[in-house]
Image (cartoon, grey):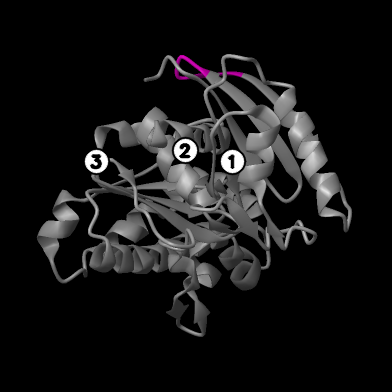
Amino acid sequence: MMKREIIGVDLGGTNMRAGLVADGNLKEVASTGVPKTDDWQEVMAELLETIGKVWNSSIEGIGIGVPGLVDAYDGVVYNVQNIPSWKAVQIRKIVSEEFGVPVYVNNDANCFALGERFFGAGQAYEDFVGLITGTGLGAGIIKWGHLLQDQNCGSGEFGMLPYLDGIYEDYCSGQFFIKHSSFDGKTVADLAAKGDKDALAAFKIYGQHLANVIKVVLFTIDPKAIIIGGSVALSFPYYEEAMRAELSSFPYPKVIERLQIFPSSMPEIAILGAAALVLDKL
């Protein structure tokens, strides 16, 4: 299975990147900025050109990850974050007609989980949740070895659930540090690395909040493992102790005893995760 040649595309709000994945490894990457335009076709033309830079006739399929609402069945993306012109774009149809291979589209959180399943630590688990803690909070759900199928790629949007005076995303993503510490997450992490007491205290509180959303994951999905990705995952050592301490209050101790929680160590997971959309189907 890993001998296939496929392309993974990470379509972000600022940059778009296409990577050639062969023999289970990322061989080549093409990257360009997302055009600032009100014309969705200009963005699409740039995307096709970027994919074309890593294309060859041996490619069996293309996977595309986007930060937005996706109809995975019809391959339509809606209201892509930071690309205002993409209100409803039939991305699968357009890309498939251009390159003549199957194309699969999903949101970036689901791609993260699939990337871990096929290329990372998730290979050891048939049942886990990939929890992204970055600019926002989202998750991809792997059940019986495959991505959980749903209608709008909305499964795992735990960050949108009500929590305290807002939603979980306010407290369990990088937004927490901006709203409650007056610094972005990277700045707080840099200060924590220097032993700054206020920064370390902020991560302690963050860990407690993250534990609470993990409790929601346990009550609703009950996975064997949770793999944490995103920019805040890089600071896992600063909030792990507080997170686990808060999880000790979960009413079913055996669940916590058996649960595996750890940060992702996968480089280029966005591209590999998009490529994994193809493997999951093939």
Circle 1: element type: strand
* Relative horizontal placement of residue 159, taking residue 18 as reference (left or right): left
Q: Which residue is mark 2?
A: 277
Q: Which residue is mark 1?
A: 64
Quadrant (top left, top right, bottom left, bottom right) of the C terminus: top left
Quadrant (top left, top right, bottom left, bottom right) of the N terminus: top left
Instruction: Pick whichever, 84 or 56, lies toward us.
Output: 56
State the predominant SS element of the stretch in magenta.
strand
Q: Earlier in the sequence, mark 2 or mark 1?
A: 1
Residue drawn at the location 26% of the way across and 33% of the way down:
124
Residue 48 spot, x, y in % from top left: 75, 34
* Relative horizontal placement of residue 252, taking residue 50 as reference (left or right): left
Instruction: Pick whichever, 89 or 159, lies toward us.
Output: 89
Q: Which residue is mark 3?
A: 126
Q: Earlier in the sequence, mark 1 or mark 3?
A: 1
Residue 165 spot, x, y in % from top left: 51, 85
Q: CA distance from mark 3 to mark 2?
A: 16 Å
Residue 73 appears in the picture as rendered: yes
Q: CA distance from mark 2 to mark 1?
A: 8 Å
Mark 2 Cα-neighbour bin, 10 Å: few <14, some 14–19, many ≥20? many
Which residues fall within the magenta stretch?
A: 22-27
Q: CA distance from mark 1 to mark 3?
A: 23 Å
Work out which residue is located at the far left of the displayed protein and give it.
254
Tell me: residue 225, above or below residue 246.
above
